[in-house]
Image: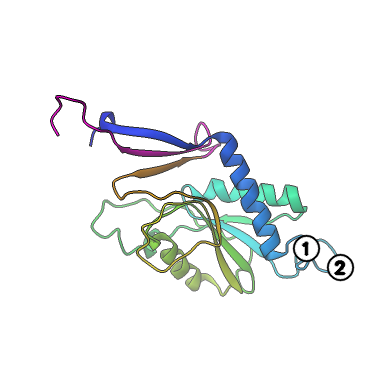
């Protein structure tokens, strides 16, 4: 379909995205007790480590932004890494080959609380692949999920622990997240088929 036949609506502005990331960071601090219960008596390090793993591509800059906000609000530096799940996907077999992206695990997974981070939660298959990948790498104490947008249409029983915004969508619509520094600006947009003008073929 030609882009000329797509209508795009901005759902979140740069300010909205910043506020949403800050809210997710506060929720993570509260739910994981980063600012209190997980701090050891001897110092500022959490007694049970927490780390963020962004799923490429959009989840990586989002994880970095969330970690920066967590540190700003709690004073706790949370390790950030990336987890490529391409080899674990079961829905890419009949699609063009997708280049592998780096996987970077910044701290041991065993006994840690791992928060997977992705920009958009859709079918749930990406997250299922991430869980399969983690199983081959280590044994976390807990695995949580943070997403900027949940657009629905789940094909698997997967639910995020931290959701920036729920955006009900149609299957024919596309949700696009752009985040600096990878993209020129922060935004969440929804594109849909524009109605045909009078006299145009339908």
Task: Specify whether residue 134 is painted magenta.
Answer: no
Residue at the spot 26% in from the left edge and 31% down from the top edge: 5
**Residue situated furthest front in the rendering:** 198
**Is residue 73 rendered to the left or right of residue 139?**
right
Decide: marks 1, 2 in contact (CB < 8 A)? Answer: yes
Q: Residues within 10 Å of mark 1 (few under 14, many from 20)?
A: some
Image spot of residue 99 (x, y percent): 37, 50
Q: Is residue 44 above or below residue 48?
A: above
Q: Which residues are magenta?
A: 179-202
**Is residue 147 rendered to the left or right of residue 97?**
right
Number of marks in the rendered image: 2
Image spot of residue 194 (x, y percent): 28, 33
Q: Is residue 15 above or below residue 199?
A: below
Image spot of residue 40 (x, y percent): 81, 68
Who is closer to the viewer here, 181 or 178? 178
Q: What is the secondary structure assignment of the residue under circle 2?
A: loop
**Is residue 117 rendered to the left or right of residue 202?**
right
Image spot of residue 18 (x, y percent): 61, 40
Q: Residues within 10 Å of mark 2 (few under 14, many from 20)?
A: few
Residue at the spot 14% in from the left edge and 34% down from the top edge: 202
**Is residue 47 rendered to the left or right of residue 199?**
right
Task: Specify whether residue 181 is painted magenta.
Answer: yes
Who is closer to the viewer here, 21 or 116? 21
**Residue wearing tag 2:** 42
**Residue situated furthest right in the rendering:** 42
**Residue wearing tag 1:** 45
Which image quadrant for residue 46?
bottom right
């Amino acid at each position: 379909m030609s882009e000329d036949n797509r209508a795009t609506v901005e759902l979140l502005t740069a300010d909205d995205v910043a506020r949403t990331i800050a809210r997710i960071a506060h929720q993570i601090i509260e739910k994981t007790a980063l600012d209190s219960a997980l701090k050891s008596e001897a110092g500022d390090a959490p007694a049970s480590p927490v780390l963020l793993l962004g799923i490429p591509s959009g989840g990586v800059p989002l994880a970095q932004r969330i970690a920066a906000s967590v540190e700003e609000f709690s004073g706790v530096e949370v390790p950030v890494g990336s987890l490529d799940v391409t080899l674990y996907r079961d829905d890419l077999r009949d699609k063009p080959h997708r280049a592998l992206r780096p996987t970077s695990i910044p701290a041991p997974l065993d006994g840690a609380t791992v928060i997977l981070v992705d920009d958009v939660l859709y079918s749930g298959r990406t997250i299922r692949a991430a869980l399969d990948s983690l199983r081959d790498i280590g044994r976390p104490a807990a695995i949580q999920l943070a997403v900027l947008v949940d657009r629905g249409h789940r094909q698997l029983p997967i639910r995020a622990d931290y959701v920036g915004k729920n955006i009900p969508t149609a299957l024919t619509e596309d949700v696009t997240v752009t985040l600096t520094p990878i993209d020129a600006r922060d935004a969440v947009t929804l594109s849909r088929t524009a109605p045909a003008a009078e006299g145009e073929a339908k």
